[in-house]
Image (cartoon, rainbow, N blue to C red):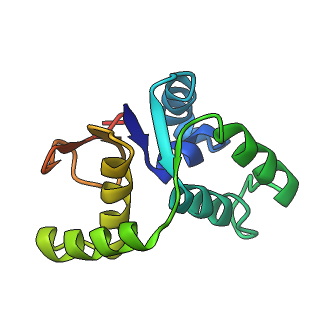
Amino acid sequence: MRFVDTNVLLYAVSTGPDEKRKARIALDLLDSEDLALSVQVLQEFYVQAIRLKKSGSLTHEQAVLLIEAFLRFPVQETTVHLVRASLDAKDRYQISYWDSAIIEAARALGCDTILSEDLTDGRDYDGVKVENPFG
């Protein structure tokens, strides 16, 4: 199973002319059945997708409908156990808390790959490897 980072969801709804290739890749990825995500990813998607200053931003209603559609994938909830694991990972890997929370959510769901443009492509976090689908 592959874990989807927020940037994949955002590219899927992008209307920017300079992001057409990435939007196509993201949409193709979201047709897959072996994907998972987390509550954190859904929250980040919502906040970024409706930003008022962003050209082509979604309405609240559009973002909510998309989040409902994304719920067809397994979703890792934020739990005390996940927060603790993320804090340990932050310290162990020397990365931001938010990146460590993505890694640990993927691990909790049994994912061996994280699809992300933000994390270091090819990096292996003790069995969870990062793949940049846009690179």
Q: Position of residue 99 (x, y in %)?
A: 33, 64
Q: Position of residue 115 (x, y in %)?
A: 36, 40
Residue 39 at x, y percent in the picture: 56, 58
Going by the picture, which residue comes out furthest to the front?
A: 81
Q: Residue at x 63, y 44 (%)?
A: 16
Q: Quadrant of the C terminus?
A: top left
Percent from the top left, x then y, of residue 133?
36, 34
Q: Is residue 125 left or right of residue 48?
A: left
Going 58% across and 28% down the picture, which residue do you hit? 27
Residue shown at 47%/68% (left/top)? 79
Q: Is 130 on the left or on the right of 25, as rendered?
A: left
Task: Please tell me which residue lies in front, 86 or 124.
Answer: 86
Can residue 65 be spotted in the picture? yes
Total tally of numbered discs in the picture = 0
Residue 18 seen: no
Name the quadrant of the N terminus: top left
Q: Left of 123 or right of it: where is 49?
A: right
Q: Nearer the viewer, residue 74 or 124?
A: 74
Instruction: Left or right? Give the position of 109 relative to 122.
Output: right
Quarter of the image for residue 17 reads top right
Q: Is residue 26 above or below residue 40?
A: above
The residue under the point 71% across, 70% down is 53
